[in-house]
Image (tube, rainbow, N blue to C red):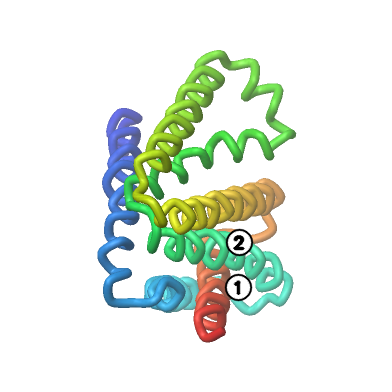
Amino acid sequence: MMNDRIKIGLAFFGIYIVWGTTFLAISFALKGFPPFILSGLRFSIAGILLFAYAILKGGKVWKLADWKRSGMVGLLVLTGGTGLLTWGEQYVSSTEACTIEAAGPLLFIAADRKNWSFYFSNKTIIAGLLTGFAGVILFLSGSLLSSATGQTELKTGGIIAIIIATCCWVSGSLLVKKDHAQKRCQCPDCTAINRCRGILSVHIRDQK
């Protein structure tokens, strides 16, 4: 069994390297693909693999109730979250996109009212959130001021899209948290289902 230090190290590796480089990868991939088609291709591969794995493991992937619930998560996280993020990166840098998304934890805590007593009784959490949010505001204000004339409106549109994407991610994450707490649907079954729903919606969105 891995000790806690190794687990923490792997978790930070996932955040800094795997999650962090996603924004850079999107910026390069946008040179050859439209934003929603790009997102659709990504999740088509992930969805097929996860769905096949869930079936092989004997997962209950055909329950209508799970499709309805996980389908909503797919719409929020994949179409709204990643889809709008990818669209927004047409007009902002990957660094700016990543910085905006960093406001997600603050939005999550603001929306997770049931746990406010825990969050706001911990001074370390409060200090970290305030410092991080202040950094996001300072970075974005400087970014907009440095934009060339005529590009500010496009960049502002991209920033707004990514902020909405972050809100979608937070909403989807809260639904997942609630489902796990109530043991409604377990991974990888519902992960595969929400990928499938998200795949369909991003492909449809790009055809409009």
Question: Which callout, 1 or 2, points to the residue nearer the camera?
Answer: 2
Kind of residue indicated by mark 1:
Lys
| Image position, residue 180 (x, y; %) | 63, 51
Q: Kindly identify the residue that appears in the image at 35 percent across and 30 percent down.
A: 4
Kind of residue indicated by mark 2:
Leu
Q: Secondary structure at mark 1?
A: loop
Q: Is residue 17 above or below residue 3?
A: below
In front: 80, or 15?
80
Residue 76 disc label: 2
Residue 191 disc label: none
| Image position, residue 192 (x, y; %) | 51, 70
Q: CA distance from mark 1 to mark 2?
A: 22 Å
Q: Quadrant of the C terminus?
A: bottom right
Q: Which residue is mark 1?
A: 60
Q: Is residue 172 above or below residue 96?
A: below
Q: Secondary structure at mark 2?
A: helix
Number of other residues with Cα within 10 Å of mark 1, as a class: few under 14, some 14 to 19, many 20 or more: some
Task: Answer left or right for 138 relative to 106.
Answer: left
| Image position, residue 58 (x, y; %) | 52, 74
Task: Answer left or right for 19 relative to 111.
Answer: left
Q: Kindly identify the residue that appears in the image at 53 percent across and 22 percent down.
A: 125
Q: Kindly identify the residue that appears in the image at 67 percent across and 69 percent down.
A: 66
Q: Quadrant of residue 198?
A: bottom right
Q: Quadrant of residue 194?
A: bottom right
Q: Kindly identify the residue that appears in the image at 45 percent across and 65 percent down.
A: 87
Residue 185 in sight in this render: yes
Question: Which comes before the other along the chain, label 1 or label 2?
Answer: 1
Residue lying farthest to the front in this orientation:
149
Residue 47 in sight in this render: no
Q: Is residue 68 above or below residue 162?
A: below
Task: Answer left or right for 150 relative to 16.
Answer: right
Q: Quadrant of the N terminus?
A: top left
